Structures are given as C-alpha cells and as structure tokens.
C-alpha cells in the first residue's frame, strides 16, 4: 500500500533576508505528501499549517505523548474516508523573540510576505491545485491568528480558513499579561535577555512572560528609534495603557478588522473557528464577540465552542481538517 511521507524543502527566502532581528533567511519547510502522491499524477489541495507562539513547522511532526503527530493524524483521516488526500505545508516563522504573528513588521520581519512566497514555491515544486478554492490556511493560538488575518488580507490566495483559539479581542487576551510588565521590568535585565534569549538559563516563568510581551510588542508596536526596537503598550511603572501605542496594537485585532475586511471574509469558502469554553487567555470571549460581529454583517461562518482550555487541543485538528476537506470543490 502507498504510504505518506514528510519531505523537507530548503527555502532561501527573499522576504526574510536582512530581517531586523538577524534571524535566518534560509529555513527548512516540512511538507506532508499524502499516500499515493508518488504513484499518481494527481494534483492535490493544500493546507498551510501555522504553529503557535514559540513553535515552528517541525512542531507538527514532533512526537506527541499518548497522541498523534500530524502525519499519523492525516493518515488516519484519509484512510477512514473522513478527509480527502491533501498536501500539508508547515512553515517555520520562529523569531529570536519566539514568534512573528505571521505578519509584516519592521520589528521582526516580513513574515506575511514569507507565507505568500512559500505559496509560489510550493506550487512550483509540488503537484498542487494552484487556486484559492483549493488552498487553506489553519493554525492554533498565534497560528490561528496568522491563519485568520492571512485569509482576511489575502482571500484571493487562501480561500479557506481554520482558526483554533487564535489571538483575538486584545483587551481580554493580552492586557492581563501586560500588567505583569512593571514587575518584570523591576526584576529582569531586559536588554540582555532580548539580545540573546537562548543564553538565559534557567528559562523561568518570568522569562517566558517577558518573551511573549516583547514578541507581541515587536510585532504590533515596532519603533526602530526605541532602544529595544519597539514600544511597550503600557507604562512599565504603573501598568497603565499608553493610548497612542495601544491603538497601534488594536489596529491588528481581528475584532477591529471585521468591518474593514467584510468583503474578504464573505468571499471565503470556509471560515471556521473554535475555542475552549474556559480558555486561560479568555480567547473564548473574543471568539464569541467575533461571531457576534460576523453575524451582524451576515458573513457566513462556522464556530464551535468545546469543553476545555487552551492546551491539549490537538485533537481539534480532526474537526478543522474534515471541515476543510468537506468545503473543497469536487
């Protein structure tokens, strides 16, 4: 019987060349080829899978304790008939700060452009269906955010979107963490940590909090004239929001973008999103609000709220991959 395989493509990215953090512009791209790919001449739909914060494409193919990696999951879905054969593309958009949010930022690099660059490369190297109706983008957490906003901005490239617990409603999901910044700033040597995060041992909870806040600041409020290369959205002594900087953050919030991208969202073959009903980052509140905004504009969507939190939810890819498969043209 034909077997699936994971192949690794070397990508020399023009979009990431000379990025402000000095991160590599040459990256490895894991690609899942479904059973029978080598034996046929068929063209296949594609799904771009975006990892969450601190993840990369390899995250999807790592061993999952008591669970399935993406190859095992997709093989099962295809063999059971629940999902049609598809090519899965797993980009590496990791940065020195932990993530890129899959957007273009003068603080991190042109990672949205990198995704578009990958589409052209993948379509040239593999037997894909090079059409937005056969090209999906999906992810969880920061990856879900990247999938949703990519679909908003480029519905002519990505015709199907699946967002698992993506960053949304910034007041709810980010502001509580931002309140820890004054304490972090009083205890940590922030410039030293950001200059070489890999050298910091041990990597404490405070370290991870700092990297998350710093990464989001570099994405949403970059400032080349600032000593750190970005502006904090809160006062580092009082935690008070700085209105002009917070407005820059909110300009990236999907809640704020719905009306701007109403036509794009309406044009999607599939707009799927879900979230646990007690997500630790309050993302279920944002998902509910997003659904409310979509409904008010008569934008078709499919939303599921499941019993759970933000972690241990890889099984939800069963739902999104089957939804993508069902929404593809014949």
Image (tube, helix red, strand yellow):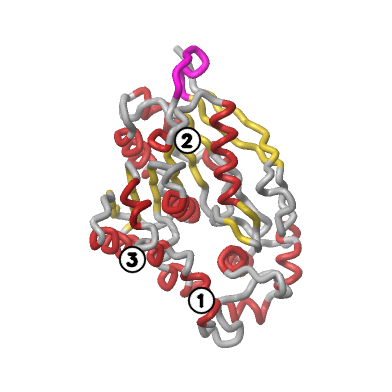
- Residue at the spot of label 1: 246
The residue depicted at 49 percent of the width and 12 percent of the height is 39
Residue 141 screen position, x and y as percent: 46, 55
**Is residue 36 part of the magenta span, yes or no?**
yes
The residue depicted at 34 percent of the width and 57 percent of the height is 262
| Residue placed furthest toward the bottom | 238
Quadrant assignment, res 77: top left
Task: Name the one closer to the observer, 42 or 155.
Answer: 155
- What secondary structure is found at the residue carrying circle 1? helix
Dots 1, 2 in contact, CB < 8 A: no
Residue 114 screen position, x and y as percent: 60, 46
Magenta region, main secondary structure: loop
Q: Earlier in the sequence, mark 1 or mark 3?
A: 1
The residue depicted at 31 percent of the width and 25 percent of the height is 81
User: How far apart are the two marked residues, 3 and 2, measured between alpha carbons?
Assistant: 28 Å
Viewer-side label of 3, 2: 3
- Residue at the spot of label 2: 70
From where the camera sits, is residue 33 visible? Answer: yes
Q: Earlier in the sequence, mark 1 or mark 2?
A: 2
- Residue at the spot of label 3: 285
Q: Earlier in the sequence, mark 3 or mark 2?
A: 2
Q: In the rendered view of the protein, which quadrant contains the N terminus?
A: top left
Magenta span: 34-43
- What secondary structure is found at the residue carrying circle 3? helix
Alpha-carbon neighbours of circle 3 within 10 Å: few (<14), some, or many (≥20)?
some
User: How far apart are the two marked residues, 1 and 2, measured between alpha carbons?
Assistant: 37 Å
Residue 36 screen position, x and y as percent: 46, 16
The residue depicted at 23 percent of the width and 56 percent of the height is 298
User: How far apart are the two marked residues, 1 and 3, measured between alpha carbons?
Assistant: 19 Å
């Amino acid at each position: 019987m034909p077997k699936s395989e994971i192949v690794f493509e070397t990508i020399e990215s023009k979009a990431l060349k000379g990025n402000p953090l000095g991160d590599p512009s040459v990256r490895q791209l894991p690609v899942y080829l479904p059973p029978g790919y080598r034996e046929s001449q068929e063209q296949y739909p594609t799904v771009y899978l975006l990892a969450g914060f601190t993840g990369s494409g390899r995250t999807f193919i790592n061993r999952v304790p008591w669970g399935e990696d993406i190859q095992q999951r997709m093989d099962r879905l295809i063999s059971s008939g629940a999902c049609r054969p598809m090519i899965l593309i797993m980009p590496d958009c990791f940065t020195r700060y932990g993530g890129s949010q899959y957007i273009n930022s003068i603080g991190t690099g042109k990672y949205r452009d990198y995704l578009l660059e990958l589409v052209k490369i993948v379509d040239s190297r593999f037997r894909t269906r090079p059409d937005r109706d056969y090209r999906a983008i999906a992810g969880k957490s920061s990856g879900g955010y990247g999938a949703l906003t990519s679909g908003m901005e480029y519905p002519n490239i990505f015709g199907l979107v699946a967002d698992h617990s993506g960053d949304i409603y910034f007041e709810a999901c980010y502001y509580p963490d931002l309140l820890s910044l004054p304490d972090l700033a009083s205890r940590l040597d922030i410039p030293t940590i950001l200059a070489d995060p890999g050298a910091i041992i041990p990597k404490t909870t405070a370290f991870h909090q700092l990297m998350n806040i710093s990464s989001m600041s570099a994405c949403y409020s970059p400032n080349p004239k600032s000593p750190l290369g970005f502006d904090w959205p809160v006062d580092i002594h009082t935690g008070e929001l700085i209105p002009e900087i917070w407005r820059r953050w909110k300009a990236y919030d999907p809640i704020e973008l719905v009306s701007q991208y109403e036509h794009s969202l309406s044009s999607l073959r599939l707009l799927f999103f879900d979230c646990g009903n007690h997500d630790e980052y309050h993302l279920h509140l944002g998902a509910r609000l997003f659904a409310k905004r979509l409904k008010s504009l008569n934008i078709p969507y499919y939303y599921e709220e499941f019993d759970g939190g933000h972690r241990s939810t890889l099984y939800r890819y069963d739902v999104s991959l089957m939804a993508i498969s069902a929404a593809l043209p014949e």
